[in-house]
Image (cartoon, coloured by chain):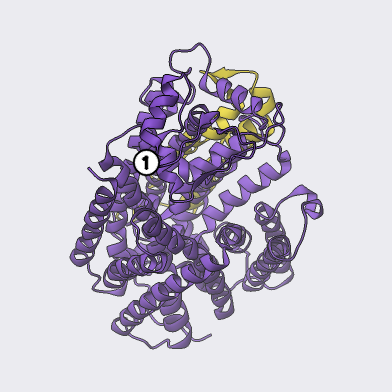
Chain colours: A purple, B yellow
Amino acid sequence: MDQTFWSYTWVAATFAIYIGIAIRSRAGSTDDFYVAGHHVHPIVNGMATAADWMSAASFLSMAGLIAFLGYGGSVYLMGWTGGYVLLALLLAPYLREFGKFTVPDFVGDRYYSVFARLVAVACALFVSFTYIAGQMKGVGVAFSGFLGIPFELGIVIGMIIVFVYAVLGGMKGITYTQVAQYCVLIFAYTVPAIFISLIITGTPIPQIGFVSNVEGADISMLAKLDTVVQNLGFSAYTRTEKPMADVFCITAALMFGTAGLPHVIIRFFTVSNAGAARSSAGWALVFIAILYTTAPAVGAFARLNFIETVNEATYLSDADYGAGAAAVEASGGMPVPTWFKSWEKTGLVSFEDKNGDGRMQIRGRNAPDGLENEVIANRDIFVLANPEIAQLPGWVIGLVVAGGLAAALSTAAGLLMVISSSVSHDLCRRTLFRQMDDRTELLVARISAAGAVVAAGLLGLFASKLGFVAQVVAFAFGLAAASLFPVIFLGIFWRRMNKEGAIAAMLTGLSTTFGYIYFFKFGGGTAEQHFFGVSPEGIGFVFMWLALAVGVLVALTTKAPPQDIQDLVDDIRIPGTRSAHGIADAGMKPMPAE
Amino acid sequence: MSHTNPAADTRAYWSANLRLTVSLLVVWFIASYGAGILFRDFLDRFFIGGAPLGFWFSQQGSIYVFVALIFVYCAAMNRLERKYQIGQER
């Protein structure tokens, strides 16, 4: 069966499911719209959080990134999972006990300040918009690369789908579509991984294959990979050239950034109580770990397989592939693999015969034989081409496209919720129009979700034209780590933390991190100028400490927060107190004038 | 409310929670930053299957430890809350 046919079938079928779920789970109140009525089961929420969290980049690019970086790729694996420990232990249960709708809600109430709320809104919007541009671009790439639909039209289709279930169902619709999207993406990811593992190591479990010997040989897969890449002039797979301090800081910035990302935090408002928030974080990490422990195995297998089947293969043009391949094999040579030919058309892999010998050389910078590298591969290719490399049937190949779209759409939807609730709840209801009633707010929430979908789509189109999406992702994590994490953390664990300290901390983290990243990404800064060798990706961790220090100093030199705020801090530390007082989920009373 | 002295109860609960949180974060730090980054050269002399131990921790082991830590925390907190009668329907 034709592969494009299967891609269309899967994409259409999964989209029909998402729409079906949206129609069944329409939101009837702001409670439904913002937090799915507070009664999502912890395991269901864990699964939704996993889909919310794992973006197009996790699904398509991460394994390839690890394949090229080897040990250097560990920063993403540890950074994007370790943050859940911080969430479960330090933030999620307390924020749930606090019991409101958004991250700026917590900041605004805890720091009894409209200004603090607005700074938090600005952080949340900035982080979410940078992130969502990448997701919409991913949707466009998936459509244009694999279904032959123009990039712009692809983004518009993606926008319509998200529009339907986010605007109709709010958090309630998003939660159940994310569960469906998780199932699609994890199936699409693990099935090819199992077969690749069987081919390379003879064991069906990728995590075990990762530490096993190569099939039919007395050498471990990783040892062989180290030897193979070094012989071609690359640095060893299990090592990195990055300084240890930089590896440390990048990992930490990603961890604290993960814990401070608003679209992840708001998922924990949807469960019924603090205890459920804790276990939900655990389940989320279980579902994430299934993909994140498979990814390094896929990366290593794919790198080894790529070199073994492509390096020194005889290149053939499309016209005489069939006969040519047979002739090359008959003379004892190795023809270029069929998957390479089929992906060549998308431009994700390319070959240029620099030395004119008709063979494909893969070489690193310090190749012992002095030859030049002739094969260029996009990092996404390793996940996309896996099913073909493993010679799986066409229906599995088509599933990978649906999986990539599921990953991108689920993350985009979570981010849309942050954007729309920041506007309708924090900006309109809690700041500008405090007398607004629930029905009006629900309408405003729907309108702002719709507006956010359009803005995100335009941003996806615009950003991909400029090609800076990858550059700005560092912003999202750095800013979340340096601006949102410190004030939420201190707000829970330090009763004495006050309004002045919080505002100072957020502004410090925001301005220093923004300035540093801007200078090195757009302002022409060079690696030699890095502060103690820390790259822009890791700087959020350094400035997080600065923000914490500034926050504490300013708080100590200004007056303590009012007694009712100190009581609030005591209450959120003890699960059940706020619901017993009847204030946790009442939530919607207009804020008293200051 | 079934407490004899709620204030003392909640204070003891909170400090037990803090002790638990700090000790779990120590494990969190050792499994990731310790084993995967700072001491990986030393650990790489040992092997788990075919993988150097430090490298394995940075790409597999730390993630398993993270998952275990959260569930240990959940179980320990549930026990604490039963002990201090917190968070239950009163």
> Which of the image's four quarters has the N terminus of chain A?
top left
Would you place residue A508 above or below residue A66 in this image? below
Disc tally is 1
Helix, strand or loop status at disc 1? helix
Please say whether residue A101 is visible from this viewpoint. no
Would you place residue A468 above or below residue B13 in this image? below
Closer to us: A421 or A157 = A157
Toward the right, the furthest residue is: A528
Residue found at x 54% / y 75%: A117
Residue A537 appears left or right of A572: right
Residue A562, how many percent across, how many down? 58, 74
For badge 1, the amino acid type reads: Tyr
Closer to us: A342 or A17 = A342
Closer to us: B14 or A37 = A37
Residue A377, how many percent across, how many down? 53, 43
Residue A524 appears left or right of A357: right
Q: Quadrant of residue A580?
A: bottom left
Please say whether residue A218 is visible from this viewpoint. yes
Residue found at x 36% / y 37%: A388
Residue B34, how many percent across, how many down? 64, 33
Residue found at x 77% / y 60%: A525
Residue A318, how many percent across, how many down? 41, 42
Query: Which residue in the protein does label 1 denote?
Result: A189
Q: Residues within 10 Å of mark 1 (few under 14, many from 20)?
A: many
Host chain of mark 1: A
